[in-house]
Image (cartoon, rainbow, N blue to C red):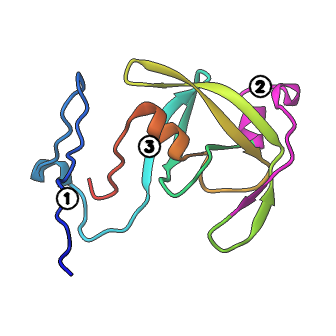
């Protein structure tokens, strides 16, 4: 039985800038590397230096301690009890959810974050909700 050939669809986004990478994007990058994609952004007018962009995360996450540093009262957190499951199958209860504006390259966007009360090397984790909303293409190689 022969396999039927199907026409391949090509992804295209109209009225958008073309995304390209060349060798100069790898300048000053020690290769090979397997580092996560870390960025800096303004969230609710607060500058964050350690934001992990994680396309494996199904939610955006912010630390409770950072909300306190931003002088955002806990009353602003919508209490919703749910568990986050890490890749090690470890679970972590979240404190609730909060919506905060995030600013990147002239674009303001309201994003929902799960608030967790834990220690972390990252202040924020931006997952697929932010990636898809902003239509970004994260590249750990570049």
For marks 3 and 1, the one nearer the N-term is 1
**Image vertical order of residue 87 relative to residue 48, above or below:** below
Earlier sequence position, callout 3 versus callout 2: 3
Marks 3 and 1: which is nearer the front? 1
The residue segment tinted magenta is 64-85
The image position of residue 42, as x and y in percent, is: 53, 28
> Which residue does the image show at 16% across and 64% down from the upper left?
5
Coordinates of residue 43 in the picture (x, y in percent)? 58, 28
Mark 1 and mark 2 in contact (Cβ < 8 Å)? no
Residue found at the far bottom of this picture: 1
Q: Position of residue 52 (x, y in %)?
A: 51, 50
Residue identifier under label 3: 39
CA gap, disc 3 to disc 1? 40 Å
Q: Which residue is mark 2?
A: 71
Q: Residue 74's image quarter?
A: top right
Q: Is residue 42 left or right of residue 123?
A: left
Residue 106 image point, x, y percent: 39, 18
Which type of secondary structure does the marked residue at label 2 adopt? loop
Q: Within 10 angstroms of label 1, few (less than 14), some, or many (20 or more) residues?
A: few
Under circle 1, the secondary element is loop
Spatial CA distance of label 3 from label 2 is: 22 Å
Q: Are marks 3 and 2 in contact (CB under 8 Å)?
A: no
Q: Is residue 76 magenta?
A: yes
Asked if the magenta segment contains residue 134, the reply would be no
| Label 3 Cα crowd, 10 Å radius (few <14 / some 14-19 / many 20+) | few
Mark 3 residue element:
strand
Which residue is denoted by mark 1 in the rendering? 6
């Amino acid at each position: 039985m022969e396999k039927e050939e199907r026409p391949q669809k090509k992804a295209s986004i109209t009225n958008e800038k073309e995304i390209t990478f060349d060798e100069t994007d790898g300048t000053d990058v020690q290769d090979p590397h397997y580092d996560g994609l870390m960025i800096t952004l303004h969230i609710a007018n607060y500058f964050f230096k350690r934001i992990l962009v994680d396309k494996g995360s199904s939610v955006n996450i912010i630390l409770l301690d950072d909300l306190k540093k931003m002088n955002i009262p806990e009353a602003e957190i919508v209490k919703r009890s749910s568990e986050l499951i890490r890749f090690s199958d470890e679970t972590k209860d979240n404190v609730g959810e909060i919506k905060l504006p995030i600013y990147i390259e002239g674009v303001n966007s309201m994003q929902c974050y799960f608030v967790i009360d834990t220690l972390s090397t990252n202040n924020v984790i931006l997952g697929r909700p932010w990636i898809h909303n902003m239509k970004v293409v994260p590249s750990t190689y570049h």
